[in-house]
Image: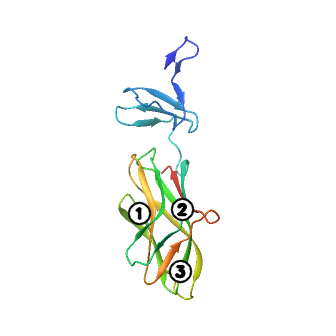
Amino acid sequence: MAISNNSTGLRPGVCTSTTRPTAPYEGQMIYETNTDMVAIWNGTAWRYLAATTPTNGTVLQIVTGTSNTQVGTGSGTYSDAGLSASITPKSSSSKVLVFAQLNWYNAGSNKVTFNLVRGSTQINETNPLGGDANNLDGGHFLTFLDSPATTSATTYKVQFKTNAGASYLRASATATCTIYLIEVAA
């Protein structure tokens, strides 16, 4: 940070949210070109400043996670689907809108249930899907609006289970499963 003369004013360091200083000092100020935000290191975390408070409904950031690996289960207990993403909300009042696009296959007439987890806490469970045809392929969109009330890194993941027989999250090079985390000002 520098003040070069009376006409240019305060000039914080310039970087992106992924190229921040690795050993910041307390009070260090940066401008992130990819988020268009100014942040100050408070000794433990970057805190964002805004000239005005973002209006409710403003999208602050979008994070995605993908999987192109097939995962199967034959259990009535939830198993990780291998699909997750982490987000660090800019405000503890923000909402996180979660979308997950899932491709699945039942090797029988069983039912599959999907579960959305924040950290280790279940936050949304679908009604059982399938169960009326043998070897059923399906696609499902899981949607949930969460209020994590934190500015710490938060991981969301998808789990699934079946009532009987085998079910697969069919992710592959041609059938990628994706989770989207969208931080919205509230």
Q: Which residue is mark 1?
A: 117
Packing grade of label 1 (10 A; few <14, some 14-19, many >=20) is some
Residue 87 visible (yes or no): yes
Contact check, label 3 and label 2, Cβ < 8 Å: no
In this orientation, does residue 128 appear?
no
| Residue closest to the eye, 105 or 57 | 105
List the residue tagged with mark 2. Answer: 99
Residue 104 to residue 176: above or below:
below
The spot of residue 146 in percent (x, y) is 44, 59
SS class, disc 2: strand
Q: Estimate the x, y position of residue 2 in percent, counting from the top left.
A: 50, 17
Which residue shows up at 48% across the image and 33% down it?
20
Dot 3, crowdedness within 10 Å: few (<14), some or many (≥20)?
many
Seen in the picture, residue 160 relative to 129 is either above or below; the reply is above
Q: Residue at x 40, y 31 (%)?
A: 41
Quarter of the view holding residue 174? bottom right
- Considering every residue shown, the one lying at the far right of the view is 174
Instruction: Describe the element under mark 3 as helix, strand or loop.
Output: strand
Residue 126 point in image, percent of width and height: 47, 74
Image quadrant assignment for residue 118: bottom left
Residue toward you, 83 or 51: 83
User: Marks 3 and 1, how far apart in space?
Assistant: 22 Å
